[in-house]
Image (cartoon, rainbow, N blue to C red):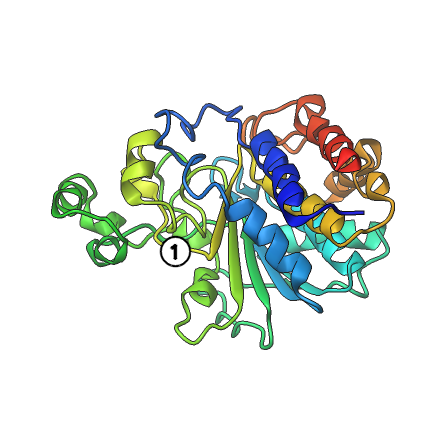
Amino acid sequence: MVPNEQAARQTLDRLRQAIQIDPGQRGLGRIPGANLFTHGPEDFTEACLHLSRTPKPEVAIVTGFHILAADAPETDGPFGAVKLAEILHAIGANVQLFSESACAGAMAHALRRLGLDAMIPVHVVRRPGEGELPPCPPGLTHLIAIERPGPSHTPDSLRQQAGTTAEQIERYVQTVPREEWDRYHNAKGLDVTAYHAPLHRWFDEPERTCATIGIGDGGNEIGMGRVPWELIERNIPGGGRLACRVAADWTIVAGVSNWGGYALAAGIAWLRGLNGLARYFDAEQHRDLWADVLQSHRLVDAGSRECRLRVDGLTWEDYIRLFGFLVATLDRG
């Protein structure tokens, strides 16, 4: 039984705190009190509550981040997207997943293993020059990005951010070359626009009516436009160049993006009273699922750039410890 709202908010905030550590030392919380973790502390809770209170959610999830050095998508993103889709389906939502072919194939394989492939479609989107971006699915209540790059800022986008000063805009113009404006960047500041379908346009649509959630761990992902450019510039090395301009209604900043997806899924499941929470967050089952997927689909660990059961350079044991915390915390309520 979920307690009253105040108690529920306190429990959900414990989940947020658990995912807001920085194992990769990216700088997410580098400046005390003024960083990516401290900005929008209610976003995680509000996203959980909004999704759980929607009677029949219609959800699209976009993911997939291409690792240049390995010429393959990374493991961070799809693992969390599939778990989130699984939980959303379990509470009665209609869910669709979107990514480029390699990542989409891996997620489709995982859903087949879970027996959910007939209920949760995975759509392939094409890279620039390979095909047109399809329109955003109609009738959505929620559009979610998890570890999905988005375009960097421009002077115009900075002017639209509340609180931006003329000095900050001048610093941006002086430090970021014009050819780097409005481009997708990886954590090293390299341009990866050509490797990703422009799914950020769905979040940018002026006629959009659905709620949006962005989950990221580096400042360069869709949703991070909700975080002031200066915070990303000051905390993340090279952040002024790579900071994404596309905002979301709620932005979940986590040390690993998959952790944000897992925590959001767990929070929704708990708020909806989904039975058997421990079954959905079984670390051994999750490991076996993705070990099988990686036998035939090349997703790479962004740390080692190898196709192996690791995420962002973390050992599986360190990475998956969150599952036990989620279950223990929500069992206590």
Q: Residue at x 46, y 72 (%)?
A: 208
Above/below status of 290 relative to 195: above
Q: Residue at x 73, y 39 (%)?
A: 294
- Is residue 144 placed above or below 260 in the rendered structure? below
Q: Residue 311 or 90: which is nearer the viewer?
A: 90
User: Which quadrant of the figure contains the C terminus?
Assistant: top right
Horizontal side, residue 304 vs residue 197: left or right: right
In the picture, measured across the screen, residue 200 lies left or right of residue 94, that is: left
Question: Residue 41: image x %, image y %?
Answer: 48, 41
Residue 211 lies, in percent from the top left, at: 52, 64
Please state which amino acid type lies under the numbered disc 1: Val
Q: Which residue is mark 1?
A: 246
Percent position (x, y) of residue 158? 24, 52
Q: Is residue 227 left or right of residue 196?
A: left
Q: Report whether 74 appears left or right of 55.
A: left
Asked which quadrant contains residue 77, the reply is: top right
